[in-house]
Image: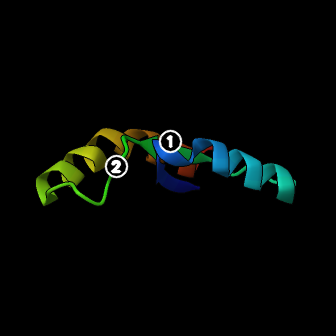
Amino acid sequence: MFVASSEFVEAAAAQGQALGFEPAACYVQHPIQDRSDAEIQALADAAFEEILAQLVEP
């Protein structure tokens, strides 16, 4: 399972197809690098339930 910004949806799909593997993924709003600590925390909080669900799914 990985977390990436929405900018990488197509790249992740292409890489997964090339490798024959489709990992669980969670995409957050892009961009990330220019965000404040509080904004990053808000993104993490918003994505937490989705990430947790994907980690514990059989």
Q: In this orientation, which residue lies closer to the viewer: 11 or 28?
A: 11
Which disc is residue 31 wearing?
Answer: 2
Q: Quadrant of the N terminus?
A: bottom right
Looking at the rendered structure, the number of numbered marks drawn on it comes to 2
Q: In this orientation, which residue lies closer to the viewer: 7 or 50?
A: 7
Counting from the top left corner in percent of width and height, residue 22 is at 75, 48
Query: What is the crowding at mark 2: few (fewer than 14 residues within 10 Å), some, or many (at least 20)?
Result: few
Counting from the top left corner in percent of width and height, residue 27 is at 47, 43
Q: Which residue is mark 1?
A: 53
The image's colour scheme reads rainbow
Residue 37 in the figure: left or right of residue 53: left
Q: Secondary structure at mark 1?
A: helix
Counting from the top left corner in percent of width and height, residue 29 is at 36, 40
Q: Tell me which amino acid carries mark 2.
A: Pro
- Quick check: can you spot residue 42? yes
**Residue pictured at 37% horizontal, 44% vertical:** 30
- Quick check: can you spot residue 58? no
Q: Secondary structure at mark 2?
A: loop
Q: Tell me which amino acid carries mark 1.
A: Ala
Answer yes or no: do the residues labelled 1 and 2 have beta carbons within 8 Å? no
Residue 35 in the figure: left or right of residue 25: left
Q: Write down the quadrant of residue 36 in the picture.
A: bottom left
The answer to whether 29 is drawn above or below residue 37 in the figure is above
Distance between mark 1 and mark 2 Cα atoms: 24 Å
Q: In this orientation, which residue lies closer to the viewer: 47 or 52?
A: 47
Q: Which of marks 2 and 1 precedes in the sequence? A: 2
